[in-house]
Image: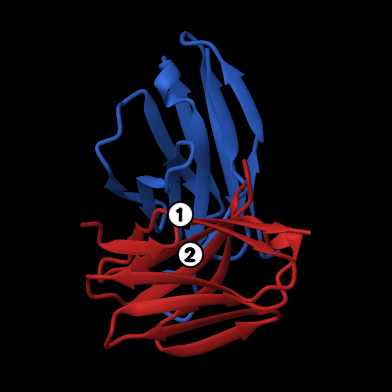
Amino acid sequence: KNEVEQSPQNLTAQEGEFITINCSYSVGISALHWLQQHPGGGIVSLFMLSSGKKKHGRLIATINIQEKHSSLHITASHPRDSAVYICAVRGSNYQLIWGAGTKLIIKP
Amino acid sequence: DTEVTQTPKHLVMGMTNKKSLKCEQHMGHRAMYWYKQKAKKPPELMFVYSYEKLSINESVPSRFSPECPNSSLLNLHLHALQPEDSALYLCASRHIGQTLYGYTFGSGTRLTVV
């Protein structure tokens, strides 16, 4: 079992839909990161969380430390949101443990 | 300046060539990282520099040679690579000790070994 599990692996939705991507982890962490990667491109850091909830524009990230679970939500999704979304956790040694990513496609 | 800049964006090299990848940041980050990413896989950590000193080498073959000449610059020297080394090479940086801040990634160098 991977230390960081994401679901779903693939997600296709229509423009405007509310999107949820989930991340569960099994190790102790100091922080959890949500990152975005467009095809063939670099990685953009969306959020770093250690507790609670953060919001940036149409993106919302939540974390439940007790349940070792985090979610990334996208409201009013748009085709430009199509990308791979990656959950990564930072352990006590500051190194990242990566999830496998969720490939999101938003159709117009 | 809040970016990590990687050059070149694309590189094609033969197995006998020597080339270098460059990564630069001016955010005062003292931890810098090299990652290798194969298609449809998460990035794999290669090297970590802390205060310009190599702190982690994840058993990377010696044909990859990192260098950190100053606090803003990180190089990855490549020599005698194999076709299976073709991948996206990502650089990242981070403030050391600043738990409030995350990582900043570059846009990567797409390397093809022929």
**Tint applied to chain A in the drawing:** red
Q: Is residue A3 above or below residue B112?
A: below
Image coords of residue B44 (percent x, y)? 37, 45
Q: Could you tell me which chain the residue with mark 2 belongs to?
A: B
Q: Which mark is residue B32?
A: 1
Seen from the viewer's position, the closer of residues A83 and B109 is A83
The quadrant holding residue B97 is: bottom left
Decide if residue A71 is on the left or right side of residue B53: right
Image coords of residue B39 (percent x, y)? 49, 37
Q: Is residue A103 above or below residue A47?
A: above
**Tint applied to chain B in the drawing:** blue
Near mark 1 (Cα within 10 A), the count class, few <14, some 14-19 or many ≥20, is: many
Are discs 2 and 1 less than 8 Å apart at CB? yes
Q: Is residue A48 above or below residue B62?
A: below
Disc 2 with disc 1 on a shared chain: yes
Image coords of residue B28 (percent x, y)? 56, 65
**Residue pushed farthest right?**
A108
Q: Amino acid at mark 1?
A: Met
Near mark 2 (Cα within 10 A), the count class, few <14, some 14-19 or many ≥20, is: many
Residue for point 41% across, 37% down: B66
Residue under label 2, please give it: B94
